[in-house]
Amino acid sequence: MLSRATFTYDALVVRDQNDWGTALTDPTVLRALAHPARLRMLDLLTEGDGATATECAQIVGLSPSSCSWHLRQLHAAGLVRPAGPSGDARQRRWAATTPRWQVALEDIDADPTEAQALDVTVTQALLHASDATVEAFTIAAAQGDETPEWRVASLVSNSVLRVTSDELDDLTETVRQLLAPYRRDARATPDGARTVHAALRFVPAAPNTTDDHPELTAGEKSSP
């Protein structure tokens, strides 16, 4: 991943860790994060009074016992805490200890080779978890399990932009400011509000011939 990028799993590429979450630098913690199902469970565990392994299973598509094992791994890494009385592991409530977090390659407390590997692994898990959330909503909408209002309001879109690095930096900051008012506690949301997964990915595409020939439009190629 680009070394200057910082990722958070509430969907933003950000620079300001004071505003956007705790910087995670411990390789042990990052290895615990590097699993799409655990990332999706952490989303659920930031809501209200947390969730049980059984409730997590309904979201991520694993068995309650598998979710219970994943939760114990997150607990060992300090990423979740018990949120209720102990008892049946599948019915114990868990809550996230760090609702917002971020990872920057240059901050990982490991040698460069391990840091690069961890950065790639966590990023891949983030992307897989995000895709799974989008797919779940798309299937539910197609099956009529979502209301027309939410189907119309949702958006999955790809765009091709031509920008400088400074312009992209400005664009990212503008989007961050637009989203900031909606990053609010569940207790402060209006009636009818739902948790929405907003996944932003602003990354340069691989170089191609159109970068060398800006007069070409999409779909056109230069001749040798």
Image (tube, grey):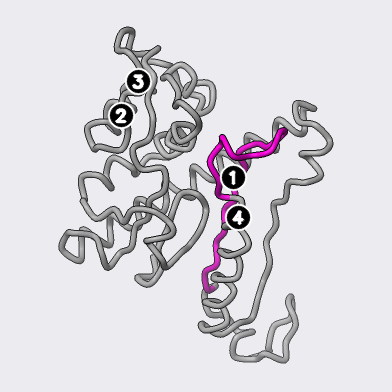
Q: Mark 4 to mark 1: distance in Å? A: 15 Å
Where does label 2 land, which residue?
81
| Residue, disc 3 | 68
In this view, the residue farthest toward the left is 111
Region in magenta = 183-204
**Distance between mark 3 and mark 4 Cα atoms:** 34 Å
The amino acid type found where label 4 is placed reads Pro
The residue that appears at 71% across and 33% down in the rendered structure is 191
Sequence-first tag of 4 and 1: 4
The amino acid pointed to by label 2 is Arg
Q: Residues within 10 Å of mark 4 (few under 14, many from 20)?
A: few
Residue 47: percent from left, percent from top: 50, 33
Disc ID at residue 181: 4
Cα–Cα span, label 3 and label 1: 24 Å
The structure residue drawn at horizontal position 59% and vertical position 39%, both measured from the top left corner, is 188
Find disc 1 in the rendering and name its residue. 197
- Give the residue type at disc 1: His
